[in-house]
Amino acid sequence: MRPRIGYKKLAAVGVAAVVGVASTIALTSGSASAAPVFGYSGYAFGTDVQTGLANSGPQVISQISCTTDPSRQSRNDLATANVNNQAIAKTVTTDTHAFNNKYGNGVTSNATAADIRVGGLLSLTGAKTTTTAWYKNGNLYYTGSTTFAAVKIGGIPVPSLLKAKPNTKVAIPGLGYIVLNRVGGVKTSTGIYSYAQAVVLHATVKNKYIPQGVDVAVLKTRAEITKPATAMVMGDAYGTKANVDKLVVSGPTSYQATCQGTEGKTVRVAVGEVVIPKVAYVGAVYTTKNGIVGADKSAVKFTSHVAGVKVGNLSIGAIESSAFAWKTKDGKFGTHSSSSIASIKVGKKVYNVPTEPNTTLEIPGIATLTFNEVVKQSRYVSVNALVIRVHGLNTKVVVGHSAAGVIG
C-alpha cells in the first residue's frame, strides 16, 4: 500500500535520466543499512519565475533542507503570488513534510491555489498538486499528480483538462502556451527525487501580464529521499533573497539544495537579471552543486555567482561564494568556505572591499554592507558573500549564499 498523500507540485531538472511519469513507479535499490539513517528533503513554491527578467524569486515557500529528522515539516498558506505586479495565484497553500511510518521513509510536498489567473486569457480554479518520494523494503517509489476544479481558456470552459495527462501542452492565444500536470521522478545511486507542478506559463508573445520570454511555474514541488550511507550531505545555494522583517519580498533566486548528492556531476541553475521591487537590480545569477554519497566517503560543494547588484547609486561588481563539506568512513571530516566581491562604488567613489569574515561597511544614506558572513559548526558551514541592509526600507538583501554540511 502506498503512502496516503495530499496535494503538491514540480521540482527542478535533475542529474540523472527521468525514469517516467506514471502515477507510481517502483525502483529497485540495494538493501537497507544495518543502522538505517535516511535523508529527507523537499520544497513547495507558489510561483517560480524560471527565465528572463522577473520581479522576484520563488514565492509562498515551504521547504526542508536535508535532515535525518522524519518529523520535520514546513508550511506557508493564505498568500498571493505575484509576477510582474500581477496576482497570478491567489490563496496559495504550500507544505512539505517528512515521514517514517508503516508506508516507509519519505517526503511529501503539496501545493494548492484557489485561483490561478492570467487576465482573461487563462483561469484555473481549485488547483491541487502533490508529489511524494519514499523508500520501503529496499525499493524506491514516487507518485505525483495535479487536478483542477475548473479550467477556462479565453473564458471558455475546457472540462477535459480538469485531470490533464502528464505534461499536457495547450496553446493560450495572447500569451503563448502552458504545460499542465508536469510530473516525474529521477533515481540516482543514492536515492530518488520526484517533482510535480500544476502549470508552467510560457509567455512567447508580448502581453501585459508576463514579460515575453519568461516562464513561470505555478505550484511547484519536489520531494527527495536518500538511502542510508556513510553520511548524508546537505546544503543549499542561491543568488539573492530579500526580506522586510520576516516577510519575504523576493525569494531565493537560482535556488538549489540536495540530500543525496549529484553522483559527482555538477548541476547548474541560472536565471537572467532580477528586479527586487523598490530595492535593487540584480544581474544574471547562477548556482552550482556537486556531491557524492557513498560507503567510503560523502562530500558536497555548492557555489553561487551573481553578475552584480545596484541599490540606488551603489554599484557592486561580481559576487561569488562557495561552501564545501566532506566525511570519510573512518570518521574524518572537514568544511571550507570562501567568498569574493569584485568592486564597490557610489558614483565615482570607490570603496575597498573587506576580506575578513563578518566585516561591515557603512555607505552613508544608502545601506550597511556586511561581507563574508560566515556561520560554522562542526560539520556544516554557511557563507553569505554580501548582506545589504537598505536604509529607510527596513530591507535585508542576501547576495551570494552557499552552504554545505554532512550528517551522520
Image (cartoon, rainbow, N blue to C red):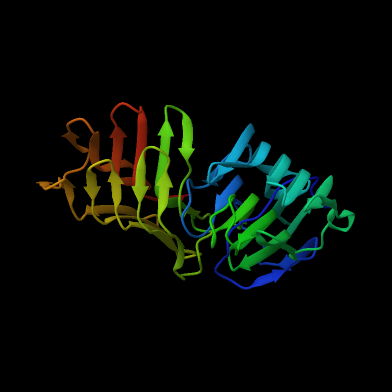
* Direction bottom: furthest residue: 17
Nearest the eye: 144 or 88: 88
Let me know if residue 130 appears in the view: yes
Nearest the eye: 42 or 342: 342
x and y percent of residue 363 in the render?
Answer: 18, 35
Q: What's the residue at 31%, 58% (across, down)?
A: 307
Q: What's the residue at 54%, 63% (across, down)?
A: 213
x and y percent of residue 248 in the render?
Answer: 48, 35
Nearest the eye: 348 or 8: 348
* Image side of residue 346 versus residue 36, left or right: left
Let me know if residue 74 appears in the view: no
Is residue 39 depicted above or below 298 in this figure? above
x and y percent of residue 375 in the render?
Answer: 32, 40
* Image side of residue 323 versus residue 372, left or right: right
Q: Quadrant of residue 158?
A: bottom right
Is residue 99 depicted above or below 229 in this figure? above
Q: Quadrant of residue 349?
A: top left
Count of marks overlaid on the render:
0
Q: What's the residue at 43%, 61% (across, down)?
A: 289
Nearest the eye: 176 or 269: 176
x and y percent of residue 81 in the render?
Answer: 60, 40
* Direction right: furthest residue: 159
* Image side of residue 289 versus residue 40, left or right: left
